[in-house]
Image: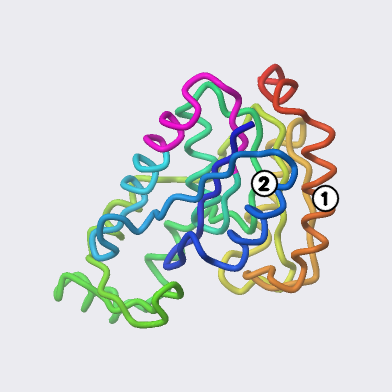
Amino acid sequence: MRCLYLHGFASGPRSQKALFFAARLRNQGFAVHVPDLNEPDFADLTLTRQLDHAQRIAEQISSDEPLLVLGSSMGGLVATLLCERLSNVGGLILLAPGFGINKRWESMPGTDELSKWQQKGFHEVFHYQTQSDRPLKYAFVQDMNQYRTDGLHVSVPTLVFHGKRDEVIPVEESRKFFRDNSEFVEYHELDSDHDLIDVLDDMWAQVDRFVARHTVVSLANAR
C-alpha cells in the first residue's frame, strides 16, 4: 500500500503535519513517501517543477499499484493536478488545498512589491523548514499564471479539510471545490486556521475512517 505526502509552500518533508500523518499511516500498513519539493533549489521553485517532481516520485514508487496522495496547502493543489496526470491515483486527502493560489500570489506582496520582485528578479520569502528568509525568483509568479484552479474536477474518493479561520487560502475555495465535486468529495470545515495544527487528532479520526472505508483496491476501482 503506497502513499505520497506533498508538503506545502516554503515547508518541507519534516513539517509537523507531514511527520504526524506519515507516522500514523505507516502504522496502518502504508509505505509513505514524503519527497522534498524544494529540490534542487528553492530559488528556482515553480508549481510546474513541483508537479513534475511529484509525478516522477509517484511513478517510481507505484507505477501500477493504487496510490493514496495527501497534500497540504500548495501541496494539495499539486496533489489534485497530479491526479489528472496519473491513472493509478486511487484517493486524495487535501489539507487546506491551495486552490485559487495564482490569484493571490499576484496580489499578496502588493503591487509595488510585485513590481520590485519582477525588476529585481527575486523576492525574499520566509522558509519554514530553514526558519530563514530565502530568495525566490520571479519565474515562480510567471509559471503560476498558467494555472487556473476554478472548475477543477476529481473522479476519485477525496477527503478535504479546511479551517474556517484560514487567512492564507479563503475557505470559500474549498467550498466551491466541494460543490463542483460533491459526488466524490467528503468535506470537513474545522474551527482552525491555515496550519490546522490544533486539529491534527480530529483530522486523523476522519482520515482513519476514510482509509478504512476505501481500501486501496476499492480506491483504484472507484475511478
Residue type indicated by callout 2: Arg
- Residue 125's x, y, as percent? 35, 76
Q: Residue at x 51, y 64 (%)?
A: 14
Element under disc 1: helix
Depth check: 143 or 172 in front?
143
Residue type indicated by callout 1: Gln
Per the image, the residue denoted by label 2 is 26
Q: Which residues are magenta?
A: 55-69
In the depicted structure, whether residue 99 falls above or below residue 111: above
In the depicted structure, whether residue 4 falls above or below residue 97: above
Depth check: 132 or 180 in front?
132
In the depicted structure, whether residue 19 falls above or below residue 197: above
**Labels in figure, total:** 2
Q: Residue at x 46, y 66 (%)?
A: 11
- Residue 170's x, y, as percent? 62, 64
Colour approach in the figure: rainbow
Question: Which quadrant holds the N terminus?
Answer: top right
Q: Residue at x 67, y 29 (%)?
A: 156
Which class describes the residues within 10 Å of circle 2: few (<14), some (14-19), or many (20+)?
some
